[in-house]
Image (cartoon, coloured by chain):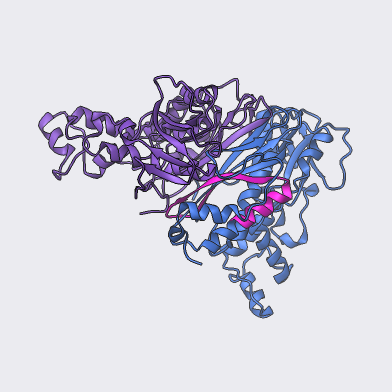
Chain colours: A blue, B purple
Amino acid sequence: MGTIGELGEFGLIARLVRRLPPSARVPLGPGDDAALVAAPDGRVVATTDLLVEGRHFRLDWSGPYDIGRKAAAQNLADVVAMGARPTALLVGFAAPPGTEVGWAERVYDGLGDECAEAGAAVAGGDVVGAPQVTLAITALGDLAGAPPLTRSGARPGDLVAVRGRLGHSAAGLGLLLDGWQDTADPAAGEVAADPAGREGAAGPAGREGARELVAAHRRPRPPYAAGAEARALGATALLDVSDGLLQDLGHIAAASGVLIDVDSAAVPVPDVLGPAGLRYALTGGEDHAFAGTFPAATVLPPSWSVIGTVAEGIGVTVDGASHGAGGWDHFGE
Amino acid sequence: MGTIGELGEFGLIARLVRRLPPSARVPLGPGDDAALVAAPDGRVVATTDLLVEGRHFRLDWSGPYDIGRKAAAQNLADVVAMGARPTALLVGFAAPPGTEVGWAERVYDGLGDECAEAGAAVAGGDVVGAPQVTLAITALGDLAGAPPLTRSGARPGDLVAVRGRLGHSAAGLGLLLDGWQDTADPAAGEVAADPAGREGAAGPAGREGARELVAAHRRPRPPYAAGAEARALGATALLDVSDGLLQDLGHIAAASGVLIDVDSAAVPVPDVLGPAGLRYALTGGEDHAFAGTFPAATVLPPSWSVIGTVAEGIGVTVDGASHGAGGWDHFGE
């Protein structure tokens, strides 16, 4: 099939665009100086992220399809976290000229499929050569006339609730860092799941659980319906958990000028997370669950878990006590 | 002042955001999951580009302020090339953790100043660590209810016209590739301007001319008013010259299904471009001039140069003959 360097910029764009379905929300798609995207209420929600090989993903841990899905998901989740409906993605794709065309196509398959799940479409982009694979994703969205759900609206007395998985991606990353490899040999699989004999996230859950966690790391599954749902339920603040629950709730606490207390017993910690599950759930990022605050009287549907309360003060506590839990710093080593 | 790695992600964002003025077109700026940008006519023009150190700029050839201005300019020009008014920029910034904070701040000063020239503002972004400095820029814009000026509207009989500089950036790049260095010593300057004794772009124009060309390479100056002007003049197609005039006119020819003939004697080739000036003007990219087609009876203001005509056929000719001139392929070496 050849490399993207052999195919050249315009040939590659033509090949990639062919994989992307058109959308009514994108009246003018790829092929001109810029795209045109619907913004029905006269405003557009816009967010951008840069994902760099070796820092945000590893080519030996994730295939191109999952890299595309994950890159799209983390930006679509940011749009949804404003209470908006995603409309379009713009994709900057950089890769070494020796990259196989088929590999690049699979990245775009992943981008397109994740967009489709969120109701959006790829509207345009750019392809360039670079030493590392890099994805620069911009997601756009529509608030349908509603005010944005920012981080600054939490009020003392509000409930704190989450929808979506917590800790799965971090536990899966832990397994990969420990050298976990999938294998058809059950015995080898068990050993590989915890090669150092340490407290392993997949310990009790075994090979199937490990697979589930690693899959969650490779491809987050943000519950995209949560944005519109939170808005309809009267949420006062909302964000997606990208760096870790406690750290991200800290953003709501700081922006709203409130104290958020998390009830650790109420945090959903499924068995698959293993003995370190609560730590993963409180500090693990990249699952892109949604965390929000709601007026105290709100009756939340079962898809949301109430995990804490908002009070006067500032900061985040767990069971009333301060904690030293951090999160992910994009310049950290 | 320290490095961006020492400052950390959130500290750096706070420092960078402080350099950016607010804008009425950005009702919600940096600091939440996503920004909110005005899209008054219910649509948004959107384009994205990825600029990678060593491929799109060199740190020994361009300072951070010019890198910021150039990155912004090439995206703002894409918005203007649709006949739109730029409203906002989203900026993904990647750099090694050892990068000086002051260096990053100057990139954002450049981004902000270029935005201001085009009437836009930086609405949000992302900062990450990476081995190379990388800028991922998304520009948004407003068509004010007008149809977009695409590449597909050129019709036989139309005039072809350009507004803005041609060839300057390529000539400046040629000087830098030849080892040109600015110097206060006139004699050394003349020698350095053409170290190999080759046909030098700066030959006749001397050191001042060389400076002008190198400055043009470091910081393009797209005439942003050209988009609205072209629309008001009834342009049938428009684009910005990013890869080279002939190559870019080829995109209009292909999208419109027409033949474009360029009259080489009508192409503006100022003396500063030197003896190879016409070649630079026809094939050099990155000045982000605007090239468009207009109905034959259009009376163009003096800021536009009529350089050719549209006929039945396909492709681009120069003085009626085919040419082998290429342009810039983003995967080429």
Apparent side of residue A310 relative to residue A64 in the rendered image (left or right)? right
Q: Residue at x 48, y 32 (%)?
A: B158
Q: Is residue B322 something one can see in this rendering? A: yes
Q: Is residue A55 something one can see in this rendering? A: no
Q: Residue at x 65, y 25 (%)?
A: B145
| Quadrant hosting residue A181 | bottom right
Which residue in the rendered view is the most extreme toward the left?
B187
Which residue is more in the foreground, A35 or A55? Answer: A35
Looking at the rendered structure, the number of numbered marks drawn on it comes to 0
**Where in the figure is residue B170, as x and y percent of width and height?**
31, 39
Apparent side of residue B101 relative to residue B137 in the rendered image (left or right)? left
Q: Residue at x 42, y 30 (%)?
A: B161
**Where in the figure is residue B96, as x and y percent of width and height?**
42, 46
Which contiguous range is marked in magenta? A108-137
On whether residue A117 falls in the magenta region, the answer is yes
Apparent side of residue A78 relative to residue B239 in the rendered image (left or right)? right
Which residue is more in the foreground, B20 or B270? Answer: B270
Which residue is more in the foreground, B306 or A63? Answer: B306
On whether residue A152 falls in the magenta region, the answer is no
**Where in the figure is residue B322, as x and y percent of width and height?**
36, 48
**Where in the figure is residue B41, as x and y percent of width and height?**
67, 26
B325 w.r.t. B146: above or below:
below
| Quadrant hosting residue A138 | top right
A278 w.r.t. B16: above or below:
below
Apparent side of residue B213 relative to residue A210 in the rendered image (left or right)? left
Which residue is more in the foreground, B308 or A110? Answer: B308
A63 w.r.t. A91: above or below:
below
Q: Residue at x 76, y 40 (%)?
A: A227
